[in-house]
Every structure is written in C-alpha cells, then in structure tokens.
Amino acid sequence: MADLNRVSVWAEALIALHLDPDWSFGFDNAKKRAGACHFAQRRITVSRYITALGTDDEVHQTLLHEVAHAVAGHAAGHGPVWKRIARDLGYDGGTTHRNAIPTELAPWVGVCPNGHQIFRYRRPSRLTSCTACSRTYSPRFHFAWRKREVTAAARREAAAPR
C-alpha cells in the first residue's frame, strides 16, 4: 500500500512539473473522497486514509486527477477540457474513485434484516432501506443502526500503510 512520505514526493514533483510554484500539497482527513483541488488556497490534498489503503498506481491516478483540475481551472469541472488535460497528463480513470474506503473509521453501522451492512461517517438522519434487498425503498429492509466508538488509535492505524 502507498507510503505517505513517497506520495508527498510524487505530489510535489507533479506540482513542480505542471503548476505554478504557489501550489502546494497536503493530506486531509476525508473518508470517502480520495482527493481534492482547492483553487482558492492553490492546494491539492489527498485523503491520508484512502491513500494508506490504495496501491501506488491508484494514488498516482488520484494525484493526476487533482493536478488536471488545477491545470484546467475551477470552471472546467469534469467536462471536456478537464478530460482532455487529464488524458494528456496520463490519467486513465473516471470522475470518482473506486478505491477502498476506511469502513473501520465509520462510527455508524447499519445492518438490514438479511445481514447486509453499510457504513456512515455521519449520524443517519432518515430511514434507509437496503438496496441489495430491494431496489426501491422498503420498510421491510430498514437498517438497524448502531454507533461504535472510533478511537484515535484506530484513526492512526488507518492512516498507516498496510
């Protein structure tokens, strides 16, 4: 899995190669989003947790995705200009990541009557039913939610490469 120090070196190299010197790189605490391009701060960040779970190639693709956003500009979104720039940089993914997410950090666990589990990082605010059991909402397949404690040690462990 990806080493955070090595990822910093890759990110700094990509930024130096493709962006102005005022752009910077850092890690953030996102649990579901792999990376972000913060235009106002001229900063690219990636999730320390998803990075630790990802392969070197997955992380490199995330960095290329975010650098493409920085090069294309805020207005480009995931449109044709961004897609062309991303392709030119060597990005071969889509608009969202398919990498593993750190479910061990989700404080809310929902279990349907058939045993399927889902994880939430915020307290569920409405009734939800299992999409594996029914494609439309069904009270027969409501999730029973339980809150679990996520310790600081668990967060530190999740940020360490495996």
Image: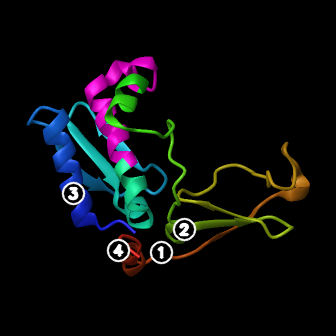
Contact between labelled residues 3 and 1, with CB atoms less than 8 Å apart: no
Please give the name of the residue rendered at 65% of the width and 67% of the height, measured from the top-left corner: 109
- Is disc 3 surrounded by few (<14), some (14 to 19) or many (20+) residues within 10 Å? some
Q: Position of residue 3 (x, y in %)?
A: 30, 68
3D distance between C-alphas at marks 1 and 3: 27 Å
Residue at which label 2 appears: 107
Q: Given the image, on which type of amino acid does mark 2 rest?
A: Pro
Contact between marks 2 and 3 (CB within 8 A): the answer is: no
Q: Amino acid at mark 3?
A: Ser
- Dot 3 corresponds to which residue? 8
Q: Residue at x 37, y 39 (%)?
A: 65
Q: Can you identify the residue that label 4 sits on?
A: 160
Locate residue 154: give its quadrant.
bottom left
Amino acid carrying mark 1 in the image: Val
Residue toward you, 84 or 71 = 84
Question: At numbered mark 1, what does the secondary structure look like: helix, strand or loop?
Answer: loop
Q: Nearer the viewer, mark 1 or mark 3?
A: 3
The residue labelled by disc 1 is 150
Q: Quick check: 106 above or below 32? A: below
